[in-house]
Image: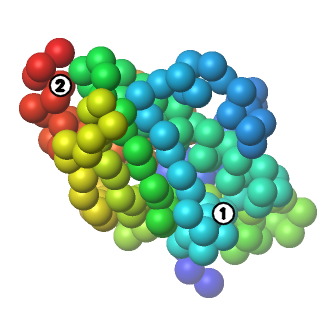
Amino acid sequence: MKKFNVSCVSAALLLCFSGSSFAEKSAVNDDPETENSQVSVTWQSPDDYRDVRPTNQSRTRFQEQTFNRLEAHFAEMAEALPEGQMLEVTVTDVDLAGQVWPSSFVGLGSGAEDVRIIKDIDIPRMSFSYQLKENGLVIKESDVDLKDMGFLHTSLRGSDSETLRYEKRMLDDWFKKEFSDQIAKQ
């Protein structure tokens, strides 16, 4: 049997139990802030994504929560764009940091829930295309394949218990590089 160090199991347990304590939005986005924001996110064929696997809830509910959190983060980033610019994103793949394992595999017994183990090798990834529009005209567009191979070795901004912290940091870094000209105009 493969052994994991205590910090990996602790991190996985933290992720497993902290994710269920947040109040979540429904699958339909009824948050007026993101509805009227400068971003539109489309999730293309989400059942085919590499890893949006839950540990302690239904797959559908976990996907809804994950997508809502990522949409809200895209909206937060888009606030830095000049007024009148709109970011349209079509996500084609998501691979969350870590991997989901049965609790019995990591020595937590057969009655416990599955856990997400975070290790260096299981990096966060995301593939999407985007169009940045101004007055209805495309001013910038690209296909993007993000991955953060050093996600465990880079200091985190914010809370260590924030849900999707590795994925959000990866998106923040991409956004700042990709739209530095637009952000500078603000």
Q: Residue at x 60, y 74 (%)?
A: 48
Q: Quadrant of the C terminus?
A: top left
Give coordinates of residue 65: x percent, y percent. 68, 43
> Furthest residue to the bottom?
1
Q: Is residue 99 visible?
A: no
Q: Residue at x 35, y 58 (%)?
A: 129
Relative to 62, residue 71 above or below: above
Relative to 51, residue 170 above or below: above
Q: Amino acid at mark 2?
A: Ile
- Tell me the residue that label 1 is attached to: 53
Q: Quadrant of the N terminus?
A: bottom right
Residue 79 left/right relative to 32: left
Quadrant position of residue 128: bottom left
Q: Earlier in the sequence, mark 2 or mark 1?
A: 1
Q: Nearer the viewer, residue 130 or 67?
A: 130
Q: Secondary structure at mark 2?
A: helix
- Tell me the residue that label 2 is attached to: 183
Q: Residue at x 60, y 68 (%)?
A: 45
Relative to 123, residue 136 above or below: above
Q: Nearer the viewer, residue 137 or 85?
A: 137
Q: Amino acid at mark 1?
A: Arg
Residue 139 left/right relative to 75: left
Give coordinates of residue 104: x percent, y percent. 76, 71
